[in-house]
Image (cartoon, rainbow, N blue to C red):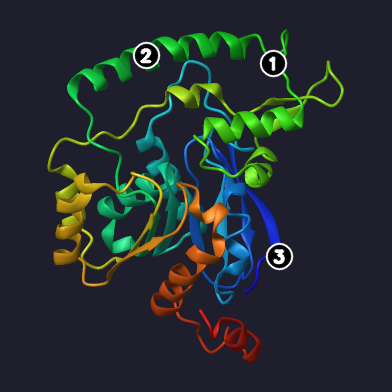
Amino acid sequence: MLEGQTIEFEDVQFEVPWGYVVGRWYGNRKVRPLLALHGWQDNLGTWDRLIPLLPRHIGYLCIDLPGQGRSSKYPLGMIYHVIDYVHIVARIVQEYKWRKVSLMGHSMGGVVAFAYASLYPNKVDLLIQIDILKQPHRGKEYLLAMIRNGAEKTMVENERLQQLHKREPPSYTYEELEEVLHKGSKNSIARENCKHVLNRSIMPSQLYPEKFYFSRDARMKWYQEFSDEPGLAIEMAKRMRNVNYLLIKASRTRHVTAEMEPIIKVIREYVPHFELHQVEGTHHVHLNNPEGVAKPVGRFILKYRPASLDSWSMDYALKHSKL
């Protein structure tokens, strides 16, 4: 498929105790979709350019994780933690009564997918991680500072949230927001692609015409990572014997580093259907170079979630014969 092609979608929403989680279900609604999880401070817009290039015999359910995009923020006083998002996956599986789940995650979403697959390996038939395997091991001093700063900064953000009805956050022109997001991603998101994330991360200012402010939960800046003890990730990997596993590494990042080699070695040993592919690009390789990512991801989906007779068509075959 070529850049610019579109795919039909339906916006979905389901309730959680603190509000709701929203998503966008692309394509086929008759079969279980692939569940896509975005990265830190992103939203489902991160998949805008990749999803239309993937096989059409299954659908793709992309969600906004709590506090990001258009899903509800956590209640006042709460701190975000990566493991909370593992529970979100469990809620979605329960909501749709899936016996199995196919997962695709970028960055933080990939960490969530890895954790869920290791905890529930018999429920996961397919795992795709984009430019992440796990969060890097942190030293003790880093972890202590992260916990302390997270608690202190989150209290400040809680106070700001309480004042939202009285005081609007700082606002910017759209062009300024593109620059803020581009630089904030360490130039990972190309300027021309910032719009895909911004569209679900900002609100129009009520005070200044033609200006906008960030609507995502600022407490996410101080979220708690899932920092494992040495050896834990290896034990997690060993549990995924029956998971079809694809890892995409971006060529111009250090998120899948030499530190991960012992884990990858174990994955190759314990996971029979494991593939590792490198694709040219930055950390947001799926957004900036969707064609490069779509080739290995498309082949992987066709191999491990093949089309059934009732979803196959000549149109489908022609479109995907060159994947």
Q: Is residue 18 visible?
A: no
**258 w.r.t. 17: above or below:** below
- Residue at the disc numbered 3: 4
Secondary structure at numbered mark 3: loop
* Camera-side mark, 3 or 1: 3
19 or 269, which lies in front?
Answer: 269
Secondary structure at numbered mark 2: helix
C-alpha separation, residue under disc 3 versus residue under disc 2 = 43 Å
Q: Residues within 10 Å of mark 2 (few under 14, many from 20)?
A: some
Q: Amino acid at mark 2?
A: Asn
Q: Is residue 257 visible?
A: yes
C-alpha separation, residue under disc 3 versus residue under disc 1 = 34 Å
- Residue at the disc numbered 2: 149
**x and y percent of residue 248 in the render?**
38, 59
C-alpha separation, residue under disc 1 versus residue under disc 2 = 23 Å
Q: Amino acid at mark 1?
A: Pro
Tell me which corner region of the image, top left, top right, bottom left or bottom right, holds residue 306.
bottom left
**Which residue lies at the image location 25% right of the left edge and 68% below the top edge?**
242
**Which residue lies at the image location 39% right of the left edge and 51% below the top edge?**
131
297 or 240, which lies in front?
Answer: 297
**x and y percent of residue 309 in the render?**
53, 89
Q: Earlier in the sequence, mark 3 or mark 2?
A: 3
The reply to whether callout 1 and callout 2 are in contact (CB within 8 Å) is no
Q: Residues within 10 Å of mark 1 (few under 14, many from 20)?
A: few
- Residue at the disc numbered 1: 170
What number is the disc on residue 142? none
